[in-house]
Image (spheres, rainbow, N blue to C red):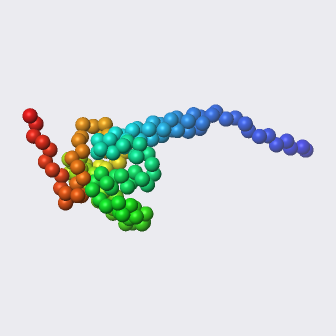
Amino acid sequence: MHLVAQTVTDSSGGGGLFSGGFLVLWLVFVVLYIVAGWKMFEKAGQEGWKWIIPIYNWYILLKIVGRPGWWLILFLIPIVNFVVWIVVMLDLSNSFGHGVGFAIGLILLAFIFFLILGFGSDRYLGPTAARGGTAPMPPAPR
């Protein structure tokens, strides 16, 4: 009795299609996030290209919200970085005239809320932390 081993080469290719679609979707999200951050930086008076430079973008974000540059070191310390991120997102929310609810959105759903800051009609009101943590009242409509 002679047994012959057979290999199964039946492949539908469905996995490749799924992963290719996922890759395209992921790239769309990345591009949208970059453009939104770029536009947000420009609204804050910074050059948009600074958004795409890792670590340097954190430094610029600290400047936008009015925190000192040495806080960048705090982003490198585990657990402390999470607390600092929350404070910076609160400051960023206030710097664009929003409150705590918007800051919670920035913390939990950063992608969506950065899109809102970048593509929305929000105006940069200045660095909140430099003013003691309160955003000025938006100008009255004329």
Left or right: residue 131 compared with residue 73 = left
Which residue is at the front of the view, 73 or 102? 73
Q: Residue furthest right?
A: 1
Above-or-below relation of 43 to 135: above
From the viewer's perspective, is residue 128 above or below residue 74?
A: above
In the rendered image, is residue 107 in sight? no
Please name the residue shown 43% across and 63% down the image. 76
Q: Is residue 1 visible?
A: yes
In the picture, measured across the screen, residue 17 lies left or right of residue 67, that is: right
Rendering coords of residue 16 (x, y %) = 60, 36
Q: Is residue 49 left or right of residue 92?
A: right
Where's residue 95, x and y in %?
24, 50
Task: Work out which quarter of the rendered image holds the C terminus and state it.
Answer: top left
Query: Quadrant of the image for the N terminus?
Result: top right
Q: Position of residue 114 (x, y in %)?
A: 33, 44
Choose between 141 and 98: the one closer to the eye.
141
Q: Quadrant of residue 83?
A: bottom left
Toward which corner of the image does residue 131 lie, by quadrant?
bottom left
Q: Position of residue 42 (x, y in %)?
A: 32, 41
Q: What residue is at 23 percent from the left and 58 percent from the top?
A: 130
Q: Going 44% across and 38% down the picture, which residue do you hit?
A: 31
Residue shown at the point (18%, 52%) measured from the top left:
135
Nearer the observer, 4 or 93: 93
- Count of labels shown? 0
